[in-house]
Amino acid sequence: MTASGTFAERRWTSPDGLSLFARDYAPGSGAAKPPVIAIHGLTRNSADFGAVAPLLAQSGRRVLAVDVRGRGLSDRAPDPMTYTPDVYARDVLALMDQAGIERAVLLGTSMGGLITMALAAIRPRAIAAAILNDVGPEVAAEGLARIAAYAGQPVEIGDWSDAAAYVQRTNGAAFPHYGPADWDAFARRVFRQQPDGEIVLDYDPDISAPIRAAGAKALVPNLWPWFRRLAKKRPTLLIRGATSDLLSPAIAEKMRKAAPDMAFAEIPGVGHAPMLDEPEAKAAIFEFLAGLD
C-alpha cells in the first residue's frame, strides 16, 4: 500500500478475480475497536466518505471506505449482471477475509445499506453493528425512479463547470443549501479527468444493467427478511434525510416498529442521501459508536 493523504490505498481481489480498491484510514491511538467498513451509493465511490472517515479514524477506529466494483479505482466487471447487492456483499467479505477482519461496523449509504443487509443474510457474524444511511428494506418508488433516470445515462461534459451543473441538476433538491464551491467539490468526487483531458463519470455505465433487466420489479424491492436479520440482536442506527424521496417517513416508521431498539436520526434540510458531514449526522454516528465500546 502507498500512503495518500490521510489514507493508504488498499487493493483486494474479488471472488471472480477483479482488483478492487479501498481507502484505508489507520485508527488513532487507544484500545482496539472493530473497524468501520463504509460502502457508498449506486453511482458514487469512496470519496463520499472523505469528510467523516478521518474523524472516525481519529476516534480510534480503522476505516475502510470501498470503491464497489465498477466504480472509482475498482475494476469494471466483464459481466454487468454481477452488479448486484449479493455480489457486492461477497466482494466486501473477500476484503474482510484478505485483511484479517472477522467483524466490522458496516456503514452503508443507499445501495451500501442494501449491501449491508445482504451481508447480514450471507454472514451475519461478520457485522458487529450497522449504520444505514437513508435506505431501508423497501424504498419509495419515486426516489428509485429518479435515480434510474440518470444512472448509467450518457452525459457530455466540457469542463468542470459543466460537471458541477450536472451534479446540481441531479442532486439539487437534496442539498438546497449548497453553493458553487459545494457543487464543484461534489463534481470532483463523482467525475474523473482522463489523461486526454476528457471529464467522465467515475463509474461503469453498465452498473444499471441489472436494474434495466429487472424492469418494474427492480423499483420496489422487498428486503424485509434481510433487514430483520440485520437488526435482530445487533446494534443498528438508521439515518434519514428529512426530505428524502427514497426513504419515506412511512418506511422509516415501519422499520422502527420492526426493530424497536434501533437508533434513529433525521437530518434536517437534507434529502437523499445525507453526506454524513452534517452536524446532526456526525453527532448521531459518534453517539452510536460510543455505545458500542
Image (cartoon, rainbow, N blue to C red):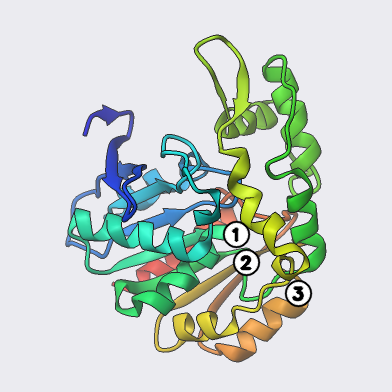
Q: Position of residue 291 (x, y in %)?
A: 37, 74
Residue 134 visible in the shown view:
yes
Q: Residue at x 69, y 64 (%)?
A: 214
Question: Vertically, is 121 above or below 71?
Answer: below
Residue contact between numbered discs 1 and 2, judged by CB atoms under 8 Å: yes
Single out the mark in the foreground, 2 or 3. 2
Residue type for callout 2: Val
Q: Position of residue 290 (x, y in %)?
A: 36, 69
Mark 3 is surrounded, within 10 Å at the Cα level, by few (under 14), some (14 to 19) or many (20 or more) other residues, namely: some
Q: Which residue is mark 2?
A: 135
Q: Is residue 61 visible?
A: no
- Residue 92 lies in what quarter of the image? bottom left
Residue occupied by mark 1: 110
Please name the residue shown 36% across and 66% down the image. Answer: 105
Residue type at numbered disc 1: Ser
Q: Name the quadrant of the C terminus.
A: bottom left
Relative depth, front residue between 88 and 49: 88
- Mark 3 falls on what kind of element? helix
- The CA distance from mark 1 to mark 2 is 5 Å
